[in-house]
Image: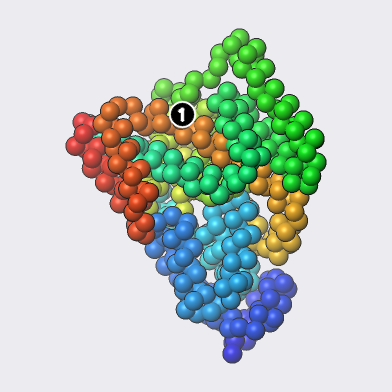
């Protein structure tokens, strides 16, 4: 039998209470808030292997071993967070913390899960800026890291694309977004058109969908043939050649982080093009090489990949910048659950909304593909780096261990020390 519902001081969502009563299964244990915090802190300390491994860990303990909810309920909650922006594993922690102890429980669970990764990334960012990596040995190690990170992004594009681009409309939308991004067309225009075109197509309004997509393609061609040659087509590896720390204001970092947190559809890797746009291409806060260094550091930590935003914030705005950027990028992941998970679930169930978000996701895949090409030119700039990239990519595809990502990145650093000095 489930224990009595904990006294949450009126903070628990009525929908959550109803769900627990009607589930007819054991519910979350009525454990004290400090113990709840420590449970999710342990999840954060063991968060190796990316979102799939993190979600499997949460499911194994909370569903299979302790029966907080039924497997069906777990799958429905996960489906909502796979459609909404933000790191799914973190959002699940917020949700199940709220299920146990109301909104304060959700807040504590989410903070606990992200805390180990944040503290480690904060410390590594301080070390990076304090001691630098200018010795030949460290530079070679980070060059190896960068080649492996590019391989991780290539794998992510393939994985996300194989799920997101499942019909001809979505393939066309992804290809259009890819070309538009390379030409420097703002992502907001691309994603709005992508979502609207696919929403029209799914609802059977084929002619408006075709007109919208054709107009977008015509606009891309017009830009490429007439406007871009006059102003200079953007380089495939845009951004400054050098950048000093502390260029961004706290307001810039907050807006950039919040925007990225609201647009991470399809997994944490989808944040990369938005963050790179602000930090490298538009803001000039850092170079592509420094951006890749931050991604490389996040790859060796037990944390969602989105934690590399802490590095971007620290490099661009110091310790306070790291706090502001991290707060902003994780805020949507907290808000979607704490404000009303069930309302989001009902909204996502609407076919038109789901279709719009599927179109946006297809557009994001195109943006990631364009960013991958830009970062490839920076991170894989020699035959030795290409060798490390190829070995890392093969290992990513064939090695599925929980700590595989961290081991592959570290191994690439060791290869860099041997091959790239």
Residue lying farthest to the left in this orientation: 418
Can residue 361 be seen?
no
Please state the horizontal and vertical placement of residue 227, each as a whole percent of the image. Answer: 64, 14
Closer to the camera in the image, 395 or 33: 395
Q: Identify the residue at image location x=63%, y=66%.
A: 76
Please state the horizontal and vertical placement of residue 52, each as a whole percent of the image. Answer: 47, 58
What residue would you read off at disc 1? 374
Total labels drawn? 1
Query: Which quadrant is the C terminus positioned in?
Result: top left
Count neighbours of disc 1 (C-alpha within 10 A) and say few if under 14, some if 14 to 19, many if 20 or more. Answer: some
Closer to the camera in the image, 173 or 241: 173
Residue lying farthest to the top in this orientation: 230
Query: Which quadrant is the N terminus positioned in?
Result: bottom right
Of helix, strand and loop, which one carries label 1? helix
Please state the horizontal and vertical placement of residue 253, each as a whole percent of the image. Answer: 55, 39
Name above or below for residue 355 compared with residue 16.
above
Name above or below for residue 31 compared with residue 189.
below
Q: Quadrant of residue 295?
A: top left
Left or right: 226 with respect to 158? right
Can residue 180 be seen?
yes
Q: Identify the residue at image location x=80%, y=41%.
A: 205
């Amino acid at each position: 039998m489930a224990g009595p519902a904990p006294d949450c001081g009126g903070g628990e969502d009525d929908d959550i209470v109803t769900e627990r009563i009607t589930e007819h299964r054991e519910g979350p244990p009525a454990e004290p808030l400090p113990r709840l915090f420590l449970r999710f802190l342990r999840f954060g300390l063991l968060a190796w292997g990316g979102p799939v491994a993190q979600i499997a860990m949460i499911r194994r303990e909370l569903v299979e071993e302790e029966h907080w909810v039924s497997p069906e309920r777990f799958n429905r909650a996960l489906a909502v967070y796979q459609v909404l922006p933000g790191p799914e594993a973190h959002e699940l922690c917020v949700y199940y913390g709220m299920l146990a102890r109301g909104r304060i429980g959700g807040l504590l669970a989410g903070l606990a899960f992200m805390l180990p990764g944040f503290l480690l990334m904060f410390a590594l960012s301080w070390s990076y800026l304090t001691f630098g990596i200018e010795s030949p040995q460290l530079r070679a190690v980070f060059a190896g890291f960068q080649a492996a990170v590019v391989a991780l992004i290539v794998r992510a594009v393939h994985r996300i694309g194989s799920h997101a681009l499942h019909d001809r409309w979505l393939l066309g939308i992804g290809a259009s977004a890819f070309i538009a991004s390379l030409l420097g067309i703002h992502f907001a225009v691309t994603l709005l058109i992508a979502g609207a075109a696919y929403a029209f197509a799914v609802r059977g309004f084929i002619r408006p969908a075709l007109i919208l997509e054709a107009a977008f393609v015509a606009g891309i061609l017009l830009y490429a043939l007439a406007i871009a040659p006059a102003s200079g087509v953007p380089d495939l590896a845009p951004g400054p050649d050098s950048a000093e720390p502390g260029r961004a204001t706290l307001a810039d970092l907050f807006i950039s982080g919040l925007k990225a947190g609201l647009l991470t559809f399809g997994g944490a890797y989808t944040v990369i093009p938005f963050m790179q746009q602000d930090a490298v291409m538009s803001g000039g806060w850092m170079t592509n090489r420094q951006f890749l260094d931050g991604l490389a550091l996040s790859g060796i930590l037990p944390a969602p990949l989105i934690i590399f935003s802490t590095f971007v914030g620290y490099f661009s705005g110091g310790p306070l910048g790291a706090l502001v950027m991290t707060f902003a990028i994780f805020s949507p992941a907290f808000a979607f659950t704490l404000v009303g998970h069930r309302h989001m679930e009902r909204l996502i169930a609407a076919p038109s909304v789901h279709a719009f978000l599927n179109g946006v996701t297809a557009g994001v895949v195109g943006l990631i593909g364009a960013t991958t090409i830009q970062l490839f030119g920076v991170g894989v700039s020699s035959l030795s780096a290409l060798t490390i990239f190829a070995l890392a990519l093969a290992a990513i595809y064939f090695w599925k261990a929980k700590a595989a990502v961290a081991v592959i990145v570290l191994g690439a650093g060791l290869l860099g020390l041997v091959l790239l000095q």
